[in-house]
Image: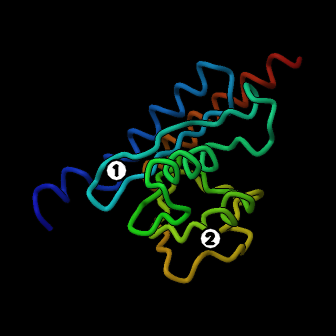
Amino acid sequence: MNFVDTLFDDTYFMRKALALAKKALSLGEIPVGALIVSKENKIIAQTHNLTERLKDVTAHAEMQAITAASHYLQSKYLKGCTLYVTLEPCAMCLGALYWSQIDKIVYGASDPKRGGISQGVAIHPKTKVVKDILAEESEGILRFFFENKRKQLQ
């Protein structure tokens, strides 16, 4: 592993995804951030959940990132790319990631109830999955959001 690889490791990019989740939180969105990085360690897409703003249940951070990265690469395939997302992708997002043929998925917090990987949703056979990167931070921001949401409903 060379200096550049240690500088731009999974933790480095997950911190960037967490910053996007915090931005989502400030906008009243469920705080999930996602970014896609090329094999050259260049961020080619960065976004967060937009389901509230767009009034669209499919506007998950991962879906937004896939669309942005595909436009950037001018390709429907994301071979050689890595997705960093603060929450385990759901079945819908994993389906899109399967078709994109992305090389690697890295996520923070697991989602045993709705997470596609936890539920056994198929991923592309060549896609590598890394979980629990900055999981505590990812879980913390989600817990904060939902605790405040419950307080508002009381």
In the rendered image, the vertical position of residue 128 relative to residue 153, given as above or below: below
The residue that mark 1 highlights is 11
Using residue 11 as the reference point, say whether residue 26 is left or right of it: right
The residue that mark 2 highlights is 98
Q: What distance separates the C-alpha of mark 2 from that of mark 1?
A: 23 Å
The image quadrant where one finds the N terminus is bottom left
Q: Local crowd at mark 2 within 10 Å, few (<14), some, or many (≥20)?
A: many
Q: Secondary structure at mark 1?
A: helix
- x 43%, y 60%: residue: 82
In the rendered image, the vertical position of residue 87 relative to residue 54, given as above or below: below
Using residue 62 as the reference point, say whether residue 29 is left or right of it: right
- x 52%, y 66%: residue: 77
Circles 2 and 1, Cβ within 8 Å, touching? The answer is no
Q: Amino acid at mark 1?
A: Thr
Q: Local crowd at mark 1 within 10 Å, few (<14), some, or many (≥20)?
A: some
Using residue 76 as the reference point, say whether residue 56 is left or right of it: right
Residue at the far front: name it.
Answer: 74
How many marks do you count on the picture? 2
- x 26%, y 57%: residue: 40
Q: Amino acid at mark 2?
A: Tyr
- x 72%, y 22%: residue: 148
Using residue 19 as the reference point, say whether residue 140 is left or right of it: right
